[in-house]
Image: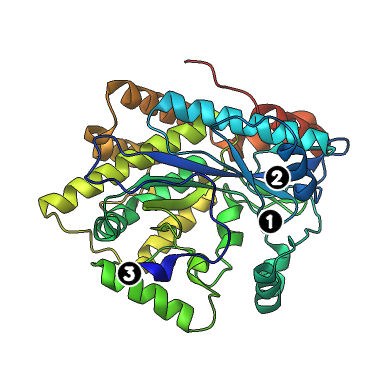
């Protein structure tokens, strides 16, 4: 039944090798979706085809692959499987730089915005699959222009992967809160920290999921969803976390693309620690928390609405508590599973920074207030997209 989750679209060039045994250090791969903006006006521009052509004509770094997305105003940056915080940070910074260099050759810039602040039309990339999605999902597909951050972590088997999915689900709203970077939507302040999550939730197959309890049940659910004729294929099973459709990994998809490179890497190593801890719980026979998906949806809504600026739903109690307290419980939960002391220290500092200065959403609102207009705000966002990379 594993074949039922292989997507029919072209897979990424970077491939994970299934480990022969549980690795000491699980590999991480990240996928960042970036918006393409007109270099002069900073309005979204349908330039991904030109960007990919420009990228193909120059020397390419080993830790970056650029790929098309469903909209011509987007580009996706895919990393290879990596081990360390430093490798991840180098890959994110290099990937953003490479995307921006190719974008410049096409008269564009690449920006880490999870939604488009400006009112604009978007353009579906030429593809029979995307054409069918446009026909079936109408305005949902037409208006869908959001950028997420997907983290892949290697697993030893589908059974282990599903056990991990069952045990990480209660923590995913906190990842959303920490990554929130989409306050604006079509020329207005949405009132949300992550409006991307609200827009993405219009897909009928998106969001929190119920416990699966076995790989057999997971694959049966995927097959049933495709069998309804609503989801076109397994690639459209848009759970907040899922088994990857093209690699032996758990793919955590709940996060916004982060404004700052360091925040993206903080999220990535937290995801690895979360996955490692869930796998350990499974091996020890600890049961997955029995929390209904309906309650997780409410926790995700609160994370989407407020980010880290107000109370979040505590994963253990299910009641609102200060964001700092909820995130502290999260770090306590995963602390034993970071890949060494240095990574743990960097992750803790990264979370501390987010809580102190605010999420990407808070940054965007501050920049708009400071500059007083969309164009200068977007220029500042582009600058922050390509900042960072130095040791802290």
Answer with left or right where residue 93 lies relative to residue 273: right
Residue 150, image x, y percentages: 49, 48
Q: CA distance from mark 1 to mark 2?
A: 9 Å
368 or 257: nearer the viewer: 257
Q: Which mark is residue 218?
A: 3
Q: Are marks 1 and 2 in contact (CB under 8 Å)?
A: yes
382 or 302: nearer the viewer: 382
Q: Residue furthest left?
A: 284
Q: Helix or strand or loop: what does disc 1 sit on?
A: loop
Residue 59, image x, y percentages: 68, 29
Q: Helix or strand or loop: what does disc 2 sit on?
A: strand
In percent of the image, x 75 and y 63: which residue is there?
126
Q: CA distance from mark 3 to mark 2?
A: 33 Å
21 or 176: nearer the viewer: 21
Q: CA distance from mark 1 to mark 3?
A: 29 Å
User: Disc 3 or 2, which lies upstream in sequence?
Assistant: 2
Residue 17, image x, y percentages: 37, 46
User: Disc 1 or 2, which lies upstream in sequence?
Assistant: 2
Judging by the rendered image, the residue that carries numbered circle 2 is 35
């Amino acid at each position: 039944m594993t074949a039922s989750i292989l997507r029919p679209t072209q897979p990424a060039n970077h491939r994970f090798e299934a480990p022969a045994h549980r690795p000491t250090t699980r590999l991480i791969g990240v996928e960042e979706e970036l918006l393409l903006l007109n270099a002069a006006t900073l309005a979204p521009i349908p330039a991904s085809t030109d960007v990919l052509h420009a990228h193909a004509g120059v020397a390419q770094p080993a830790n970056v692959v650029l790929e098309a997305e469903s909209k011509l105003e987007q580009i996706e940056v895919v990393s290879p499987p990596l081990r360390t915080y430093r490798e991840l940070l180098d890959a994110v910074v290099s990937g953003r730089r490479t995307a921006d260099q190719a974008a410049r050759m096409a008269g564009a810039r690449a920006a880490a915005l999870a939604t488009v602040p400006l009112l604009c039309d978007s353009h579906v990339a030429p593809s029979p699959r995307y054409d069918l999605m446009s026909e079936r999902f109408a305005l949902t597909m037409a208006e869908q222009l959001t950028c997420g951050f997907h983290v892949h972590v290697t697993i030893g088997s589908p059974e282990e992967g599903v056990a991990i999915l069952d045990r990480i689900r209660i923590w995913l709203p906190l990842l959303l809160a920490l990554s929130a970077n989409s306050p604006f939507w079509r020329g207005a302040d949405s009132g949300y920290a992550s409006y991307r999550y609200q827009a993405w939730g219009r897909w009928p197959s998106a969001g929190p999921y119920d416990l699966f309890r076995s790989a057999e049940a997971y694959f049966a659910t995927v097959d049933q969803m495709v069998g309804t004729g609503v989801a076109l294929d397994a690639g459209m099973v848009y759970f907040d976390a899922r088994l990857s459709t093209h690699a032996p990994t758990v793919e955590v998809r709940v996060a916004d693309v982060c404004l700052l490179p360091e925040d993206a890497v903080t999220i990535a190593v937290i995801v690895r620690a979360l996955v490692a801890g869930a796998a350990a719980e499974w091996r020890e026979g600890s049961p997955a928390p029995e929390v209904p998906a309906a309650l997780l949806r409410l926790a995700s809504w609160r994370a989407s609405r407020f980010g880290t600026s107000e109370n979040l739903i505590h994963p253990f109690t299910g009641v609102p508590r200060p964001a700092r307290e909820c995130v502290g419980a999260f770090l306590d939960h995963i602390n034993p599973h970071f890949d060494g002391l240095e990574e743990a220290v960097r992750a803790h500092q990264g979370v501390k920074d987010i809580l102190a200065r605010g999420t990407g959403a808070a940054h965007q609102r501050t920049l708009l207030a400071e500059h007083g207009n969309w164009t200068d705000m977007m220029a500042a966002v582009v600058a922050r997209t390509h900042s960072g990379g130095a040791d802290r």
